[in-house]
Image: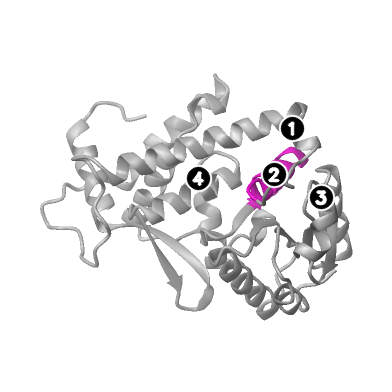
Amino acid sequence: MDAYLSSSQNSGNFFDPAPVLIVADSDLAKARASRTIGAAGRRVADVVGFADAPERIRRQVAASALWIELDDYSGAPTDALHDCVAADVGDGRCSAVVATSAELLDRIGAHALNTSLNVIIDADEAERAAALAIATFEIGPGARVSDVTADKNAARLRQLSEEVSRIAATLARLSTGPSAAPRPAESAPTADVPPVSAETVRSVIRARRLRARYFPEDLFADPAWDMLLDLLQAEISQLRVPVSSLCIAAAVPATTALRWLKTLIQEGLFVRRADPHDGRRIFVELSPESSQALRRYFAEVGQVPVI
């Protein structure tokens, strides 16, 4: 079981789905993760706790995917596991999914924003199956899934594909062309930036939320703009914004918001700041360039309603 993707073990079952290693911090979490893996038609290689996981992972000849089910934050063991997994994913040894709840988003801090980890938040069964399918998609010729290609799970996979495509298109626009966003600099906004009141920004946010009273909210999903507005309001009011709060402000499912947040940080529109009182806690701010751009935008539109 240690070498669960070694050539010796799988040579006789080349077309079998590769097994998945589960790491969970409670019996309920282990059972929930096992159901997800089983429903996708994959075998469970092993189920281990957080304290034993780093050593268990190191013993693998190769890894197909790791499924981490996080119901609680246990401090050092949780941090050590995420560091170990992020390093393995970065080296191409495996892919990983971290399933957790919104209430733990700030506790896992920078790990939630690590681009090596696919973090899903309060995910339903379809989204969990879709995340597993994506994580195991490029394992090799033997990789395949069963339930995730049918009915609601197939629809969710299409939705995820569209989300990823949209984020990729945004990234491309930000990275090329004359309007490319500048990288953040450690400088304060210049003196000629027009002033914007916090109440002005709050009124725009309220107006955007009011649309959901009259139309389906997903018609207007624009998480990047919603997060930009929330951070501008916080900057003017001199408030710090944790990751969980910003994901709520995005007005989309937390997993989708987290994907957008990672992209916006990578592209330099947002910057991360560590909480000086808690090294694990991360705050998010506008980059100086993003702050200036937003303030000039509000000044240019003037009295025209901004929605």
Q: Residue at point 30% right, 27% down?
A: 305
CA distance for labels 1 and 4: 32 Å
Number of the front mark, 2 or 4: 2
How many residues crowd around disc 4 within 10 Å: few (fewer than 14), some, or many (20 or more)?
Answer: many
CA distance for labels 4 and 3: 32 Å
Pointer 2 or 3: first along the chain: 3
Residue position marked by numbered label 2 in the rendering: 133
Q: Residue at point 41% right, 68% down?
A: 273
Amino acid on which the number 2 mark rests in the picture: Ala
From which residue to which does the magenta span run? 120-138
The image shows residue 152 at horizontal and vertical percentages of 74, 29
Pointer 2 or 1: first along the chain: 2
The answer to whether mark 2 and mark 4 are in CB contact below 8 A is no
Residue position marked by numbered label 3 in the rendering: 37
The residue tagged with tag 4: helix, strand or loop?
helix
Pointer 1 or 3: first along the chain: 3
Pointer 1 or 4: first along the chain: 1
The answer to whether mark 2 and mark 1 are in CB contact below 8 A is yes
Amino acid on which the number 3 mark rests in the picture: Ile
Which is more toward the observer, 274 or 6?
6
Q: Quadrant of the N terminus?
A: bottom right
CA distance for labels 2 and 4: 28 Å
Residue position marked by numbered label 1 in the rendering: 149
Residue position marked by numbered label 4 in the rendering: 249
Q: Quadrant of the C terminus?
A: top left
Pointer 2 or 4: first along the chain: 2
The residue tagged with tag 2: helix, strand or loop?
helix
The image shows residue 50 at horizontal and vertical percentages of 76, 73
